[in-house]
Image: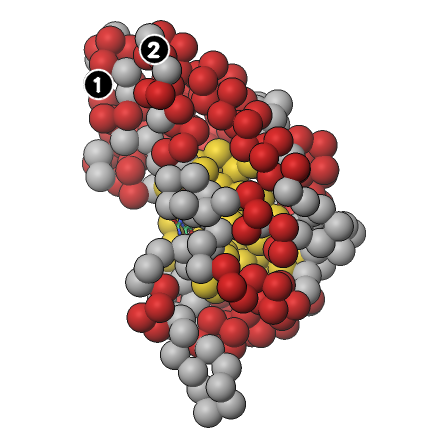
Amino acid sequence: MIVDKLFEHVKERGHVCIGLDTDYSYLPEAYAKQFKSKAEAIYNFNKDIIDATYDLAACYKVQIAYYEAMGIDGLRAYSDTLKYIKEKGQISIADIKRGDISKTAEMYAAGHFSGDFEADFVTLSPYMGINDSIEPFLKYIKENEKGIFVLVRTSNQGAKDFQYIKDENGLNLYENVADMVEKLAEENLGSCGFSSIGSVVGATNNEESGSLRKRLKTSFLLIPGYGAQGGKAEDIKAYLINGNGAVVNSSRGILLAYKKENNGEDNFAMYARNEVIRMRDDIRANI
Ligand SMILES: O=C(O)c1cc(=O)[nH]c(=O)n1[C@@H]1O[C@H](COP(=O)(O)O)[C@@H](O)[C@H]1O
């Protein structure tokens, strides 16, 4: 199962998931100007970041919104970025946050687990229900070495709007979602003991991280919110089991690391690499 490869990457390289949320404005100006189009510049920027970091990263998360916003050229850069991640032997998470009725979800699954936009994992919203939003993806997990990360408790302030609504037993909505995801996760275990049915849990709002991990016993975790959103390495520990079972995403923190340096523009990929090393060691020191 794909989760076994992710588990090995974490063991060998650490927990860092590099977020390719590549906004054109993040590119050094002189660098960007060399290319014929914005999309070509973005793809080449991603390629340089991947070349400088693939031996250190657990995986890459490509946030589709940044590419969709640029239309067809942007989607070509998205597709080429996913292909390059694969070419380097790396794992891709397509951050698409889809969720719809089952017939439509079937098309999302085909669209993101095969063809031009094929990725190893996708992120899903469970709001429309397990049978509709999640079930259509399961056959790819069993038959095609694919995986999913379901939104359970997100990193943003707005997480409080719905995710903390309590049921008649005093359980938060996100705890109910966690229980449903974990049930599916246990039916799709890899040999590493974790499941290719993962959960998204934010690195922020962490008072309950220990109790949440107790509910999500086998689900592999994608933890966004480190760095730019204020999540810290100390917040990760409670989510790990024997030091594994989670990847921690940072997007702006890595892509924009060069901006903190004098003349960083000329060496943006090297500064991204340095930030990945710093983040990897920061997390390891807090396990
Ligand atoms: O599913 C996600 O990846 C996600 C879930 C969540 O709860 N919070 C969250 O920030 N994300 C994503 O994680 C990334 C965070 O980016 P940075 O804040 O720049 O590191 C973005 O791609 C978000 O879309």
Which residue corresponds to mark 1?
Answer: 37
Kindly state the secondary structure of the residue where label 2 is placed: loop
Please say if the residues under marks 1 and 2 sit with CB atoms less than 8 Å apart. Answer: no
- What colour-coding does the image apply? secondary structure
On screen, residue 230 versus residue 10, left or right, reads left
Q: Write down the quadrant of residue 77 in the picture.
A: top left
Q: Identify the residue shown where x is 22% and y is 39%.
A: 69
Q: Identify the residue shown where x is 37% and y is 45%.
A: 229
Residue 1 x, y percent position in the rendering: 69, 49
On screen, residue 281 versus residue 103, left or right, reads right
Give residue 262's mark. 2
Say few, some or many: other residues with alpha carbon within 10 Å of mark 2 (under 14 / 14 to 19 / 20 or more): few
Residue 134 x, y percent position in the rendering: 49, 65
Location of the C terminus by quadrant is: top right
Q: Nearer the viewer, residue 161 or 134?
A: 161
Disc nearest the viewer among 1 and 2: 2
Q: Write down the quadrant of residue 107 in the picture.
A: bottom left
Q: Nearer the viewer, residue 144 or 226?
A: 226
Residue that protrudes farthest toward the bottom in the picture: 168
Give amino acid for label 1.
Answer: Ser
Note whether residue 212 is visible. yes
Residue 158 x, y percent position in the rendering: 31, 62
Give amino acid for label 2.
Answer: Asn
Cα gap from disc 1 to disc 2, whole angstroms: 27 Å
